[in-house]
Image (cartoon, rainbow, N blue to C red):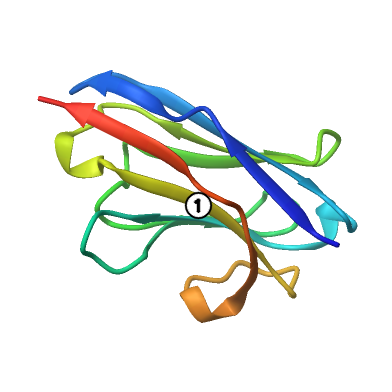
Amino acid sequence: QVQLVESGGGLVQAGGSLRLSCAASGRTFSSYGMGWFRQAPGKERDFVAAINWSGGITYHADSVKGRFTIFRDNAKNTVYLQMNSLKPEDTAIYYCATTLSSALRVGVGAYVYWGQGTQVTVSS
């Protein structure tokens, strides 16, 4: 059974940084694309960033481009989201997810396994 466990969330002041981690188990991690999504209270789950199986191709939402970076370490079965220059509007629960494809995917519907989420709160 595939398991995804996020960590690294917390409370940070605007302008600060956090690094989220997502540890995967249950299948060959290095064969599949991974993504990060976020959901603020009362809002839909939004795409944040995605990465292909090797880490050689990434894509970031316009709202985080230049501030967030997704990367992965296949030897550690872990995908990361480095978040810099955080803003109060980045406050949300952050989820990692994985697809059934080796390629990078953007849509929520392409992801079949999800973690439990980690809370990120950015104070102004």
Q: Position of residue 59 (x, y in %)?
A: 47, 57
Residue at x 17%, y 43% (from the top left corner): 89
Q: Position of residue 105 (x, y in %)?
A: 56, 71
Residue at the limit of the structure toward the bottom, as seen here: 109
Amino acid at the residue labelled 1: Tyr
Quarter of the image for the C terminus: give it.
top left
Quarter of the image for the N terminus: give it.
bottom right
| Quadrant housing residue 120 | top left
Task: Decide if residue 1 is on the left or right side of residue 18.
Answer: right
| Quadrant housing residue 112 | bottom right
Task: Decide if residue 53 is on the left or right side of residue 51.
Answer: right
Give the structural element (helix, strand or loop) at label 1: strand
Front residue of 70/14: it is 14
Task: Decide if residue 29 is on the left or right side of residue 10.
Answer: right
- Residue 50 drawn above or below residue 99: above
Task: Decide if residue 14 is on the left or right side of residue 100.
Answer: left
Q: Position of residue 100 (x, y in %)?
A: 74, 75
Front residue of 116/16: it is 116
Residue at x 23%, y 65% (from the top left corner): 43
Front residue of 17/40: it is 40
Front residue of 100/122: it is 122
Q: 10 Å neighbourhood of mark 1: few (<14), some, or many (≥20)?
A: many
Counting the numbered discs, the total is 1
Residue at x 53%, y 57% (from the top left corner): 50
Q: Position of residue 99 (x, y in %)?
A: 68, 70
Residue at x 24%, y 52% (from the top left corner): 63
Residue that carries the numbered disc 1 in the rendered image = 95
